[in-house]
Image: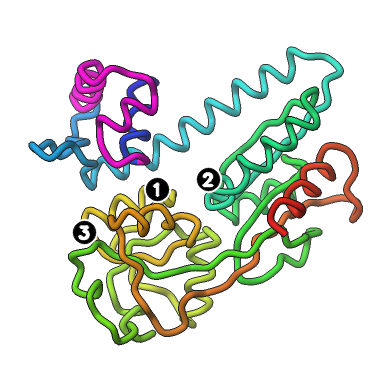
């Protein structure tokens, strides 16, 4: 499991050395750990060069699958911990990728400071899966993206977001001043999020039809890495690309119909008026990003 966590950290932080620092592993141990994982899986996971190590296309897919594995492991540990504490207040939360990566940690930090006695479990899914969990009663509160508010659950807007077009600095679109047309964007080979994600749904709704996906991935971090590697441009949340654009590893490109403004929403089933820990977390989210 340590090697899997390291590989995901390499994808998130852009290099083997940065990934090793993030998980608290010495560089030589990290190198050996990834090499053992490559031998066990039978596929190359990293491009190695004098400039450093970066994720291969096969590695990106393994990272996507690994995120699901790690999320399941965390859910198992959190659930077991909850069972071990009788009488403790609990709150089950499910959040889409963009919200889970960039907003939820801040909300939970404030919530836990106010309610340290409440045990919180978090699942990270795409918007479609979060809504399914809410409808089935498998979580107390969900957070989703998407162009339209769902009709069959209660909802409240907690933040605003924008979708922007980005590419690697050496991409042919990177230097152009004339906006990329909607037709070009529709026909281009984009790196995208998977079907069912709020980002993909909002993009296709704005374009009026499906996009040509050269590669579809289940996390914003994997999409960023693929774009930086030159696989193709992508349309992602401004939250997800802000740091990379600031660092110059990605370039924001003007395009017709972009940026796309969208609402990020809390969703829940049952009574319209939330109570208890779920109501408290919703209040934190609305207050923090209002």
Residue under label 2: 101
Magenta segment: 12-40
Q: Is residue 172 left or right of residue 124?
A: left
Is residue 31 in the magenta section? yes
Q: Quadrant of the C terminus?
A: bottom right
Question: Which residue sits furthest left?
Answer: 50
Residue 177 picture quarter: bottom left
Residue contact at pointers 3 and 2, CB within 8 angstroms: no
Residue under label 1: 221
In the foreground, 174 or 265: 174
The residue located at (48%, 62%) in the rendering is 238
Q: Between marks 3 and 1, how big is the CA–CA gap?
A: 15 Å
In the foreground, 269 or 121: 121
- Scheme of image coloration: rainbow
218 w.r.t. 163: above or below: above
Q: Position of residue 28 (x, y in %)?
A: 20, 17
The residue located at (77%, 43%) in the rendering is 281
> Around disc 1, counting alpha carbons within 10 Å, would you say few (fewer than 14), some (14 to 19), or many (20 or more)?
many
Residue contact at pointers 2 and 1, CB within 8 angstroms: yes
Q: Quadrant of the N terminus?
A: top left
Residue under label 3: 230
Residue contact at pointers 3 and 1, CB within 8 angstroms: no
Is residue 188 in the magenta section? no
Q: State the count of labels.
A: 3
> Around disc 3, counting alpha carbons within 10 Å, would you say few (fewer than 14), some (14 to 19), or many (20 or more)?
some
Residue 236 picture quarter: bottom left
């Amino acid at each position: 499991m340590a090697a899997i966590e390291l590989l995901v950290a390499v994808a998130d932080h852009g290099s083997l050395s940065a990934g090793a620092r993030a998980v608290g592993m010495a560089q030589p141990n990290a190198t050996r750990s990834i090499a053992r994982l490559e031998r066990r899986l039978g596929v190359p996971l990293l491009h190695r060069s004098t400039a450093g190590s970066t994720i291969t296309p096969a590695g990106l897919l393994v990272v996507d699958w690994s995120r699901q594995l790690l999320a399941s492991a965390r859910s198992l540990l959190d659930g077991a911990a909850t069972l071990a504490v009788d009488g403790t207040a609990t709150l089950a939360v499910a959040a889409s990728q963009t919200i889970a990566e960039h907003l939820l940690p801040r909300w939970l930090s404030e919530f836990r400071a106010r309610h340290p006695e409440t045990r919180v479990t978090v699942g990270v899914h795409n918007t479609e899966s979060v809504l399914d969990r809410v409808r089935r009663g498998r979580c107390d509160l969900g957070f989703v993206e998407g162009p339209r508010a769902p009709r069959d659950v209660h909802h409240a807007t907690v933040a605003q977001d924008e979708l922007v077009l980005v590419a690697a600095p050496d991409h042919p679109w990177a230097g152009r001043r004339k906006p990329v047309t909607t037709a070009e964007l529709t026909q281009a080979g984009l790196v995208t999020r998977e079907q069912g994600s709020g980002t993909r749904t909002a993009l296709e709704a704005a374009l009026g039809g499906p996009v040509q996906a050269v590669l579809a991935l289940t996390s914003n971090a994997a999409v960023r890495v693929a774009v930086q590697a030159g696989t193709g441009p992508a349309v992602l949340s401004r939250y997800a690309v802000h740091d990379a654009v600031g660092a110059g590893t990605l370039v924001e490109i003007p395009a017709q119909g972009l940026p796309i403004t969208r609402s990020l929403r809390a969703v829940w089933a049952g009574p319209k008026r939330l109570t208890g820990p779920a109501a408290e977390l919703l209040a934190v989210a609305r207050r923090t990003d209002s």
